[in-house]
Amino acid sequence: MIEPKQNIYLIGIKGVGLTMLAQFLRRAGHAVSGSDIKDVFMTDRVLGATKIKVLSPFSPKNIPTNLDLIIYSSAYTPDNNSELAFIKVNPDRFKNVRILSYAAALGAVFNKYYGVAVCGSHGKTTVSAWLGYVLWRAKKNPNVLVGSRVPQFKGSSLHGESKYFVAEVDEYQNKLQYFKPQGVVLNNIDYDHPDFFKTPAAYTKVFSDFVKKIPRAGWLVINNSDSNTAKIKKVCSGKIISYDLMTSGREGKEVRGADYYALNLKLKNADQFFTVIHKGKNLGEFKISLWGEHNVLNALAVIAAARILKVPLSVIKKQLAGFKGTERRAQVLGSYHGALIVDDYAHHPTEIKATLNGLRGHYQNKKLIVVFHPHTFTRTKALFKDFVSSFATADELIILDIYGSAREKQGGVSSAELAKAINTYNHKKQIKQSVKNIATIPQVATYLKKALKSGDLLLLMGAGDVFRLAEKLL
């Protein structure tokens, strides 16, 4: 448990998870500072707005003398971080300081509340922010932590006075082991993080173990059409609520078996409209400003969870429509000589397809140019065949060299190989698409300054720093 008004220091504070936790702790009244490398990340904006002091680069001299708690990123160990190495060899100095990993610290906070954990392979950032927004606007005064900046929160967290705590929780490195949820929203299970989970079965087991922890009085909201989630729902002791889409080709008993399902999807101007049925009762038409069928599914998850948490349906309808999304999720950044620039975090084949389909539905007549930054060698190698078939709806594809993780062995696959395989696939499928590997962001910027035309749509895609391309163009 993190006691009130502590002096807290975070090592690796610019990481997405540590940033949202740092902002939350600062708003809760703690004295918060931290350290990281000098590079500027998307999280610098959140930390600066909250006036959290960040020291760079890493150095034992950064560590304050008067401390109650140190929280460190799992990306760092005493072997690769000078501050953690200093702490390890000076146990007397830190004997009265509690030292926790990021996940353990977040779990310690989360477990004090009525915790609602939003997890799954895809959509957890959007769902946690959206649910938090609905609860906030419904005057439920929730505590919310999201793994991305939410413009309407002016940061990535909310600190409220209620018992509710909504958090985006991550399965990587089995961080789920630290959480004791009362409610869980589990969007989907789609094999990822092959550097840590060597098999799909090992990946699924982490979610199964997590669902087992839901108490009998608790609840689980799941995607009815996700086969991997269906396999593990039986281990849940609490109430299970499911949601689904009724679209062309999916109109049978399987969809109607869901507690909530959406039908009559329509796109009007910049918004999506759909009808929601709950256990045979028509709840009326809903409107959202986010694009794509995947965001209709996300909205259904929010509706189901918000109703469990006693938010009136009329309020849910209004606030669902009012949510504008999070940064790096189909985020419009601006335009370059008439070409629209959109940034998206998608880095898994399933996410790539969903994002491209959503944009294609919204911008039907634009030339779609995708710049993809593959994230980690292990993911690119393990999901290589799926990546090859993920970009078919783009008119032009540029693949940057792989953004490697410091935690993995580099190599084993390359962006040049991926571009070649996509060209081969396109030839077989008679897909007309320009595909090329351009190594660096500055090189891509030089190319695009000549290639982009008014009316084009440029999509920047990946979990690394592909967004820096927009900085060079805008």
Image (cartoon, grey):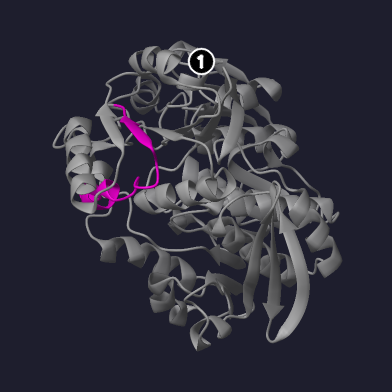
Where residue 348 appears, as percent x and y from the top left, is 37, 48
Residue where numbered disc 1 is placed? 473
Name the image quarter holding residue 149. Answer: top right
What amino acid is found at the position of numbered circle 1 in the picture? Leu
Q: Nearer the viewer, residue 452 or 95?
A: 452
Looking at the image, residue 306 lies above or below residue 348: below
- Bin the neighbour count of mark 1 within 10 Å (Cα to Cα): few under 14, some 14-19, many 20 and up: some
**Left or right: 311, with 224 as reference point:** right
Residue shown at 35% from the left, 23% from the top: 81
- In the rendered image, the residue lying farthest to the left is 412
Q: Is the C terminus in the top left, top right, bottom left or bottom right quadrant?
A: top right
- Residue 59 visible, this angle: no
Q: Nearer the viewer, residue 472 or 198?
A: 472
Where residue 141 appears, as percent x and y from the top left, is 81, 51
Name the image quarter holding residue 68. Answer: top right
Q: Nearer the viewer, residue 411 or 31?
A: 411
Q: Which segment did they paint magenta?
A: 382-400
- Residue 446 visible, this angle: yes
274 part of magenta stretch? no
Looking at the image, residue 167 lies above or below residue 312: above
Residue shown at 71% from the left, 48% from the top: 269
Looking at the image, residue 253 lies above or below residue 100: below
Where residue 284 appears, as percent x and y from the top left, is 78, 72
Residue shown at 52% from the left, 53% from the top: 123
394 part of magenta stretch? yes
